[in-house]
Each structure stands twice: as structure tokens, then as C-alpha cells.
């Protein structure tokens, strides 16, 4: 007799129930929504802001429902009736709230609480289906040039001081670094130092009366290299930040000279993504200026928090190091005060510079500047009566920490002065992912049009249904009762495939649907091998029970060999492929594993239930 022990049947039932439960969330379509959060990770959204939002939407007749503020209070979500109104609603809400808030498009899940309580979540859909966001970013390469000019200016001043060459070196408004010296010898020595330290600069010499001048400018080729580096560095940083967000199957690629495309399929918190991607969040470490320092060598900055009492402080223009020298950053708490802090680890060059400067400035104060790229929005009415939105980006630099240097600092130290643990965690994330080489601006933000996504989903589901129907018809006509068992196992296979993808938070793309269709064919292929083997055993005059047992046992090796080789190919595709290829490889890999379970165990369990408990003379195969 062919009978499974009770525990094997129980195991199969548990796995099938498990699959049905975790596949169920995919039956609930998400609602189009608008998500609101502050520009800072520690910002709080109150009922006052939420009332402004609802009034703005009601004034324009946009249907909405389910307004809610998150448990932490750092974001709010407004659900809409019509996805076509998302962009209009976003513009209205942004104007109602003004600057200081990030308003982003989102898709709000509708999975029941009893499912989510046990970890049930729907599959993420790729941008070619639905549920993603597309950003087009513009890199401000001019700021990269200005930053490099300031770097050269600071470096030249430091090099001349070390060589004891006295002269006045200043960065001009046109970007040129100009030096004035009292003698030709000093000027020539300075020129040699600059050429040795910064060979990429073009140095020219002039004379006026008793003063000797030199002028150092960035060459055109170097300028192009700086611009290209800024875009490539931002590309790397954005990829690191996207990885920190944990987005599946993201796309981050360069477009043209200074633009970057970011596509985040299946993302749940678009406001956080927009804030994390767009934030410059760089740091500058500067010594506090001496009281007798000339005005040309110092700058005044306000404090980011009022905990220091004063409105601001004067810092030297010379920068010790920037956030680009940070190799690691972790949020934490000060054990004495309990305040949020960020523990910083510098790279070797950054540690050397920090140690050199702090060693000679004990008991002076070191300021940490927090740099944010913000946008000032103004609304202007044109002559035709239409409203024009003008966004003006600007950099805000504020002091977050001003502490006295007690000992020479090295590779590791900490930054305090942050308002909340959320802000400390966000700053650590941004520094850990890497500083942006130049600020970026959001040129375009959109989600995939609902008609495109819906049509792709409709065609993809239809292809799976047609494939399943044709396979089911063939199996039922050709293998009869055994065909029924195969069709049931095939249906369970698709359910398990969807459940596993949901648990793993895998992103389903259009090529992924093609992988599911292929899995349907591969799953039934295993059953065909088993049934063909059973027929051969019957032709060799084996009894029905012996034929069933031999058919499953002897086909096992063949099925394992075929599926393992295909699985290896799928793994290679995932390892070396990108985008659509990975989406195909994911569904194919999972489908191979689930199809082996349903073909070898599921089908046999059903056949055993039909024929295993009794003596039979003939099989309906």
C-alpha cells in the first residue's frame, strides 16, 4: 500500500495553510495616498498641519479619507479616492503647509490588521506594474566647483604657512585664488609650492608697483573632471542611501551630463526616501575664530539649537575636515546626559588632519557645522492669470556643536547637540552612506501611470491564467485522475510562490510574471516525468501500487538533476543580471523550489489519498 505517515500529511497541510495565509494580503489593492513628513527626521506632524491639509483638499473638491498620524508623530498619511488626483493633491498640500515639509506620493496598504499582526504583507510591485516612485535629480555642479575652489584656497594658505611664506591669499568672487607678496622671491616660492601641491591649477604672475601678485585658477579640463566626479560621487552616495533604505530592485543611474534617475519600486515610505535622497547633510569642522582675527578670515553662523544660549558664533573660514572624511557613523546616547549623539570614525587622512589641528589648539573650541540644502518656494501670478511656482535652492549652515578641545582628537570622536534620537539616526545614516559631493535638486517626481500599471498587471495575470488553463486541460484529458492531482498541486505551487515572495519582500516585475509562467510549465514537467514512469511500470506488468511507488521514486533523481541545473542558472542570472533580469531570476528560483515540493510531495500525497488505502486493479492514468 502507498500511504504517507500522518506527520507527512500534516506537514503538507501546514505548509499549504502557511502559503494561503501569507499569499492572502495580495488580494487587497493599495490606496493612492499622500505622505507628509518634516525636512528633519526629528520633526513632528501635529493635528494643526493635518487640518490645513484636509481644508486644502476639501476646498478643491478632492475626495480623501483615512487621515492619520504615525505612532511616532513624524509623518502623516492621507488616502485618496482617485489615483489620478495624486499630483494635484501633492501640489495643494505643499502650498498649504509651505516650506519645511516634504510631501510625497505613496501607496497605502489595505491589508487587514489581523493579517499584518502576523507579518502578512503583499508583494512589492515593480515600476512596470505599480507601487513605485520615480525621481529625476539634478546635480548642482557649480556648487562642486565652488567647494573645490574653497578647498584649494584653504590648502594653499596652510601650505604657505608651513613653508613660512608671508603673503595675503584670498579667494576672489570669480573663483580665482589671488596672492599678494612683498617681494618677487616670496611670490616665486609661493608659485613653486602651489605647482608642487596642486599641479592641476594654472598659475600666472603679475606685478603692480612694489607688490607682486600670482593668480591660480582651475583649468577647463580640471573643471570638467570636478563636475564629472561630483555626478559620479553623488551616484555612488545615492546608491548607498537607497541600500540603507532597504529598497528591493532599485534603479539608480546617470542620465546626461548632470542628472540622475532614481526608481524605487514597492517603497512604502516615499517621504522618507525623498528626504534621505535629497539631503546634502554634510559636515564641516572649523575652529572658533580668535577675537582679534580679521573679518576676512572668519564667518558668523547661528546655532541650530538654542541650548547654547547665544544666537551664534564666529568660526574660522579655514575648514579642518568635511563629512567626506567620515568612514563610519553610528547613532547613540551620551551616558552622562542621556542626549542623542553620533559616534564618528574618520578615514586615515581625516584622522591625521584632525589630530594635527587639535594637537596645536588645546583649550580652543571646535565647531561642527551642519549643512542642509533647502528650497524656498514662491508663488507668482503671471500676466495670463496662471500661477507659477518658483523654487530657489539655498544652503543652510548652522552650528550643531561647539565644544572645547581638551585633548588631541584622532580617528574616533562624537558629535552632540542634536535635537532627538531620530535626527541623530538620520545624520548617522547619511554620513555612513557618504556625503554628497554637490547638492541635488528634485527636477521631477512621479509614479507610474495607473493605466500602464493596470494594463501590465492585467496582461500578466491573463498570461498566467491562459498558461495554467492550457496545462490543466492537457493534464486532465491525458492523465485523467492523476491529471486532477497535478492541477491541484500546480495551483498550490503558485500560491506558495506568491507567499514566499511576499515574505521575502521580493519585487514582482513584468519579467517576474514571465518567470511565473515558466514555473507553471516546469512544475507540470515534473509531474509528466512521474506519470510517464508510472505508465512504463504498468507496461512492464507491475501492480498499480508498485507502479505508483516506483514511478515517484525512480523519477526523483531525474527531476532533481533537471531542477538543480536550472536553479544554478537562475542564481547566476541574479548574480550578474540587473533590473528586469533579476526580477525574472527571483521568481524562477523560488518557483523551482516550490514546484519540487508540490510535485514530489504534494502530488504523491493526493495520489496516496486516492489509491493508497485500498487494493486497486487499474489506475486512471
Image (cartoon, rainbow, N blue to C red):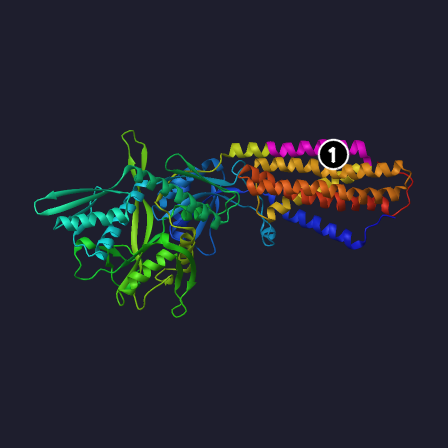
- Main SS of the magenta part reads helix
Residue 586, percent from left and from top: 60, 42
Residue located 17% across and 42% down the image:
205
Residue 588 versus residue 611: which sits nearer the camera? 588
Left of 459 or right of it: where is 207? left
429 up-or-down from 594: above or below: below
Residue at 73% across / 50% down in the picture?
13
Q: Please, is residue 382 above or below residue 162 in the view?
A: above
Q: Residue 121 versus residue 386: which sits nearer the camera?
A: 121
Residue at image coords 30%, 48%: 395
Indicate yes or no whether the magenta region holds residue 467: yes
**How many numbered marks, from 0 up?**
1
Residue that mark 1 sits on: 472
User: Crowding near pointer 1: few (<14 within 10 Å), some, many (20+)?
Assistant: many
Magenta-span inclusion, residue 405: no
Tell which of 164 and 457 is nearer to you. Answer: 164
Asked which secondary structure carries label 1, the reply is: helix
Q: Say if residue 89 shows up in the picture.
A: yes
Q: In this picture, which residue range is highlighted in magenta?
A: 459-480
Left or right: 251 in relation to 408: right
**x, y percent for residue 222:** 31, 40
Amino acid at each position: 500500500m502507498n500511504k504517507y505517515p500522518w506527520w507527512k500529511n500534516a506537514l503538507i497541510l501546514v505548509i499549504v495553510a502557511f502559503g494561503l495565509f501569507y499569499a492572502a494580503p495580495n488580494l487587497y489593492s493599495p490606496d493612492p495616498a499622500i505622505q507628509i513628513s518634516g525636512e528633519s527626521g526629528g520633526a513632528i506632524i501635529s493635528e494643526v498641519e493635518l487640518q490645513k491639509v484636509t481644508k486644502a483638499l476639501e476646498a478643491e473638491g478632492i475626495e480623501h479619507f483615512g487621515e492619520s498620524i504615525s505612532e511616532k508623530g513624524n509623518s502623516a498619511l492621507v488616502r485618496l479616492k482617485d489615483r489620478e488626483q495624486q499630483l494635484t493633491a501633492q501640489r495643494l498640500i505643499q502650498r498649504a503647509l509651505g516650506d519645511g515639509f516634504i510631501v510625497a506620493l505613496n501607496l497605502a496598504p489595505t491589508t487587514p490588521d489581523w493579517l499584518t499582526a502576523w507579518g502578512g504583507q503583499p508583494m512589492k510591485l515593480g515600476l512596470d506594474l505599480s507601487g513605485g516612485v520615480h525621481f529625476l535629480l539634478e546635480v548642482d555642479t557649480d556648487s562642486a566647483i565652488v567647494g573645490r575652489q574653497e578647498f584649494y584656497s584653504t590648502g594653499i594658505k596652510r601650505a604657505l604657512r608651513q613653508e613660512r611664506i608671508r603673503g595675503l591669499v584670498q579667494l576672489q568672487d570669480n573663483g580665482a585664488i589671488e596672492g599678494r607678496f612683498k617681494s618677487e622671491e616670496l611670490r616665486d616660492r609661493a608659485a613653486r609650492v602651489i605647482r608642487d601641491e596642486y599641479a592641476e591649477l594654472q598659475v600666472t604672475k603679475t606685478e603692480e608697483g612694489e607688490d607682486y601678485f600670482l593668480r591660480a585658477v582651475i583649468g577647463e579640463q580640471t573643471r570638467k573632471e570636478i563636475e564629472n566626479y561630483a555626478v559620479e560621487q553623488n551616484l555612488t552616495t545615492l546608491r548607498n542611501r537607497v541600500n540603507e533604505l532597504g529598497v528591493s530592485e532599485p534603479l539608480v543611474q546617470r542620465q546626461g551630463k548632470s542628472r540622475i534617475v532614481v526608481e524605487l519600486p514597492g517603497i512604502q515610505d516615499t517621504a522618507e526616501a525623498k528626504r534621505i535622497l535629497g539631503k546634502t547633510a554634510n559636515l564641516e569642522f572649523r575652529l572658533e575664530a580668535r577675537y582679534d582675527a580679521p573679518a576676512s578670515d572668519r564667518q558668523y553662523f547661528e546655532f541650530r539649537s538654542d541650548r547654547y544660549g547665544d544666537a551664534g558664533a564666529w568660526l574660522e573660514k579655514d575648514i579642518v575636515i568635511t563629512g567626506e572624511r567620515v568612514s563610519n557613523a553610528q547613532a547613540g546616547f551620551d551616558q552622562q546626559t542621556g542626549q542623542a549623539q553620533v559616534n564618528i570614525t574618520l578615514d586615515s587622512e581625516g584622522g591625521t588632519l584632525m589630530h594635527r589641528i587639535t594637537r596645536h589648539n588645546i583649550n580652543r573650541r571646535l565647531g561642527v557645522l551642519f549643512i542642509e540644502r533647502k528650497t524656498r518656494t514662491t508663488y507668482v501670478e503671471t500676466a495670463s492669470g496662471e500661477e507659477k511656482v518658483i523654487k530657489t535652492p539655498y544652503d543652510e549652515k548652522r552650528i550643531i556643536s561647539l565644544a572645547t578641545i581638551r585633548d588631541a582628537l584622532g580617528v574616533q570622536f562624537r558629535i552632540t547637540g542634536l535635537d532627538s534620537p531620530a535626527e541623530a539616526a538620520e545624520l548617522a545614516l547619511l554620513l555612513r552612506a557618504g556625503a554628497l559631493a554637490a547638492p541635488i535638486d528634485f527636477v521631477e517626481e512621479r509614479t507610474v501611470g495607473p493605466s500602464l500599471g493596470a494594463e501590465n498587471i492585467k496582461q500578466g495575470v491573463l498570461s498566467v491564467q491562459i498558461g495554467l488553463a492550457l496545462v490543466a486541460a492537457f493534464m486532465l484529458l491525458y492523465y485523467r485522475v492523476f491529471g486532477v492531482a497535478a492541477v491541484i498541486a500546480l495551483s498550490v505551487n503558485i500560491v506558495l510562490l506568491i507567499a514566499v515572495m511576499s515574505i521575502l519582500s521580493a519585487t514582482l516585475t513584468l519579467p517576474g510574471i514571465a518567470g511565473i509562467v515558466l514555473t507553471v510549465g516546469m512544475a507540470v514537467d515534473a509531474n509528466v516525468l512521474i506519470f510517464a514512469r508510472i505508465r512504463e511500470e504498468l507496461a512492464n506488468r507491475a501492480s498499480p501500487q508498485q507502479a505508483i511507488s516506483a514511478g515517484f521514486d525512480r523519477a526523483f533523481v531525474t527531476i532533481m538533476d533537471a531542477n538543480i541545473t536550472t536553479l544554478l542558472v537562475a542564481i547566476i542570472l541574479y548574480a550578474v543580471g540587473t533590473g528586469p533580469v533579476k526580477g525574472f531570476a527571483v521568481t524562477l528560483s523560488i518557483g523551482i523550489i516550490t514546484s519540487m515540493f508540490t510535485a514530489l510531495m504534494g502530488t504523491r500525497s493526493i495520489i496516496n489519498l486516492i489509491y493508497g488505502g485500498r487494493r486497486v486493479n487499474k489506475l486512471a492514468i
